[in-house]
Image: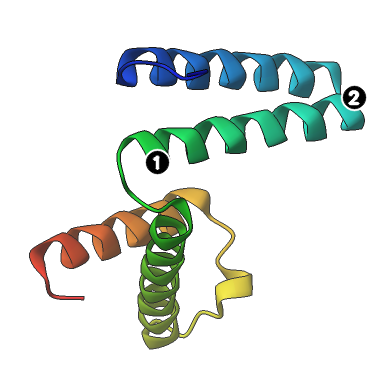
Amino acid sequence: GFDWPDLTGVRAKGAEELRELDQAIASADAKAIEHELGDVLFALANLARHLRTPAEDALRLAIGRFEKRFAWMEARLQEQGVAIGEAVDPARLDALWEAAKALEKEGAL
């Protein structure tokens, strides 16, 4: 019975854990960062459980989307004669990422 009755508490706990992670990051304490990051991941896994969505499956799908988008970005840069390691302009990379996401949303990627 040690559980939240609905998503409100689960979401609030996740937000709390993220705030604590932010504090640990600000402290630059590696042990505290690792501790709080673990708590954030645990809170997210608990959220997935409440949503009846397997956390590992959701993560695998996210990784697949990342790989697909990144490959698309690499291909666009290659068409422009630029290696991904040479494309250091964050705005350029972000624009490509957003374009890949838009194509994916349209079902074209």
- Residue 63, position as x, y percentages in the image: 46, 65
- Residue 53, position as x, y percentages in the image: 33, 49
Please, what is the three-letter code of the amino acid marked with disc 2?
Asp
Q: Residue at x 55, y 74 (%)?
A: 84
Please, what is the three-letter code of the amino acid marked with disc 1?
Ala
Above or below for 4 versus 48: above
Residue 29 — which label?
Answer: 2
Residue 10 — which label?
Answer: none
Q: Residue at x 9, y 64 (%)?
A: 106
Mark 2 lies on a secondary structure that is loop
Q: Nearer the viewer, residue 77 or 2?
A: 2
Mark 2 Cα-neighbour bin, 10 Å: few <14, some 14–19, many ≥20: few
Q: Residue at x 46, y 58 (%)?
A: 59
Q: Nearer the viewer, residue 51 or 26?
A: 51
User: For residue 57, which quarter of the picture?
Assistant: bottom left
- Residue 77, position as x, y percentages in the image: 43, 77
Give the Cα distance between marks 1 and 2.
29 Å
Above or below for 69 versus 20: below
Residue positioned most to the left: 106
In primary-sequence order, the first of circles 1 and 2 is 2
Q: Which residue is mark 1?
A: 48
Residue positioned most to the front: 1
- Residue 74, position as x, y percentages in the image: 45, 78
